[in-house]
Image: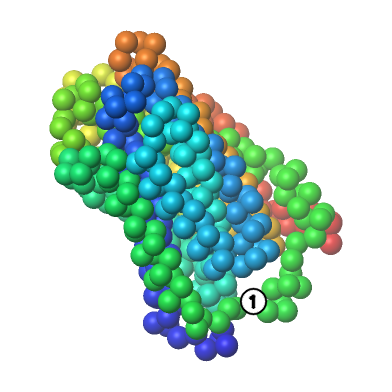
Amino acid sequence: MGANLNSSKNKMILLVLYFGWIVSYIDRTVVSLSILKIGEDLSLDASKLGIVLSAFFMGYAIMQIPGGWLADRFGSRKVIVIAVLFWSAFTALTGLAWSLTSLLLIRFLFGIGEGGYPSASTKAISDYFPADKRTKAQSTMMSSNALGGALAPIICAPLLVWLGWRHVFWVISLLGIIFVIWFLLSTRQAGGYSNSLDKAHKPKREEYKQLLLNTYLWKVLLVFFFINITSWGLSSWMPSYLMQVLGINLKSIGIISAIPALFLAAGMIISGRIINKIGSNAKYGVITGIFIMGISLYLMTLSTSITQVIIYQCMAFTFMAFVMSFIFTLPHRVMEQKVVGTAFGILNFGGQAAGIFSPMIMGALISSSGGSYKSAFLFLTACCLIAGVIACFLPSAKRNQEVTDATVKTVG
């Protein structure tokens, strides 16, 4: 039945999965835009608000690898539906939060729900697309990250002005219900592509062991961790910075925040092609991109106008795109294909774990400095430099592939 899945159904399933990613970005972005108002209503200072922002990432990171296992065990369709319904329920409950404790618990459980979607949606690509179309479908779906980051503030900021923060969480929770209905209808008569050949190529225990002993993977994970400290730190606190320090009103925040995200989206599309061309020399582009990111963030701390801040943030996001493209495509480029899914799960866990620490540390730095964001941005700059130093010790992808191939042959 799966072999008869027509092209239009392929595109519809990919579109609904893409929409699911956009919904997830809207649901997680609205809390960053409304965090100052939440703090006022619940009497929370910056350090406590930082913990609130980190609570989501704690649940999100914890669920990365289990989400993939559940999708493999019970099927992507079931996991996706349950995950989206779960996170939609806790999106709505955020609007009912009455204290710091309730907010922390709700945002943590919201993160658990969203954490099941990345691996399950990736599994869905494997379930509903033939082997020769999966790479293109996966890369297309992942481009939703940057576009979601651009669209979310444009959609959420006017809603916050119009409805207030509590009502907005109730309204956007309905997007998850729309997604579930659309997804169930799109996949109702869709066959799968799993077959005996796929089962015959399941990784063995020795191959998992070799993956875990692969130092290249762990070095890239550390690069991703420190880069994502910068990414999540900016996405969590930039709206507050624009409002508190630069005096931008909430209605204008959506458009202003979308500009750097659009540079990130364009950068990811372009950088993917560059990486394919330069091959094993991609690591030098990563090192260069990381250090330019660090310089841009440092210049942002010295900026005195909104124009300067946005220019430097756009520079940082453009070069961040190259680093992200390198990381997201790495499992397919240099890892044994049997363990690509596990390798992606490990890398993504490392990257998302950064979100646990980044908003919390920045909140503490802002609070301890009396509301100044300079030390917080310097912290992000330092993390970029650490990532750059680690990247210097990465072997070339080509050499690492030769080592991996030799190891697999030995294991076999």
User: Do we see residue 159 in this rendering?
Assistant: yes
Q: Is 194 situated left or right of 58 in this image?
A: right
Residue 376 versus residue 341 in the image, above or below? above
Residue at position x 57%, y 31% in the image: 390
Between 62 and 85, the one lying in front of the other is 85
Give the image's coloring scheme: rainbow
Residue at position x 76%, y 53% in the image: 208
Give the x, y percent position of residue 263: 28, 46
Name the residue tied to disc 1: 194
Determine whether the residue tagged by mark 1 lies in a helix, strand or loop.
Answer: loop
Between 48 and 264, the one lying in front of the other is 48
Residue 16 versus residue 399 in the image, above or below? below
Residue at position x 34%, y 57% in the image: 174
Q: Where's the C terminus, which quadrant?
A: bottom right
Between 254 and 147, the one lying in front of the other is 254
* Figure disc tally: 1
Q: What amino acid is at disc 1?
A: Ser
Residue at position x 69%, y 40% in the image: 215
* Residue 285 lies in quadrant: top left
Query: Dot 1, how many residues are within 10 Å of its Cα: few (below 14), some (14-19), or many (20+)?
Result: some
Q: Is 44 situated left or right of 209 in this image?
A: left
* Residue 127 lies in quadrant: bottom right
Give the x, y percent position of residue 106: 47, 39
Q: Is 286 situated left or right of 339 in this image?
A: left
Q: Where's the N terminus, which quadrant?
A: bottom right
User: Do we see residue 399 in this rendering?
Assistant: no
Give the x, y percent position of residue 370: 32, 10
Give the x, y percent position of residue 199: 73, 72
